[in-house]
Image (cartoon, helix red, strand yellow):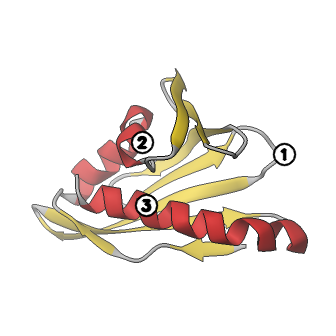
Amino acid sequence: MELNSKKIIVKKSAAALCEFLSDVKNFEQLMPENISKFEVIRADAFVFALKGMPEIALEVKEVVAPNKVVLGAISDKIPFTLIGNIEAIDDASSQAELVFEGDFNPMMAMMIKGPITKFLETLTTNLEAI
């Protein structure tokens, strides 16, 4: 299952945006309002929970500066990655898109598609505002 966010313009250079997304503590600023937990557990990992949802732990899996940051689930119970694709526009702005890729059975995919789509929308809206 692959879900793509809308492409957004961020008032940061591609390098600065890549650095921002590579620093896990910055994700707290991007989370939805209904977050019930956010905790940095390592320099490259954090755990979060939305109200009514299980906790999810993510870690930085790969950084291809300045164009890509890949976060992946630490647990293999819910195997997925969150990819931040970044394209430079000029020295002070860049275009970003978030991509959610997960390996789920059809029933699970159907259940989580709506909430994950809404989650991606919130992350990109908040990223656009930084």
**Residue at point 31%, 72% (across, down):** 8
For the residue labelled by badge 1, is the local secondary structure a helix, a strand or a loop? Answer: loop
Image spot of residue 28 (x, y percent): 41, 38
Q: Which residue has dot 3 on it? A: 122
| Number of the label disc, if any, that sits on residue 110 | none
Assess whether mark 3 and mark 2 are in contact (beta carbons under 8 angstroms).
no
Q: Which residue has dot 1 on it? A: 77
Q: Is residue 13 above or below residue 51?
A: below
Q: Amino acid at mark 3?
A: Thr
Mark closer to the chain start, 3 or 1: 1
Q: Amino acid at mark 2?
A: Phe
For the residue labelled by badge 2, is the local secondary structure a helix, a strand or a loop? Answer: helix
Mark closer to the chain start, 1 or 2: 2
Q: Which residue has dot 2 on it? A: 27
Q: Nearer the viewer, mark 3 or mark 1?
A: 3
Q: Amino acid at mark 1?
A: Lys
Q: Splitting the image into 4 quarters, where does residue 129 fall? A: bottom left
Mark closer to the chain start, 2 or 3: 2
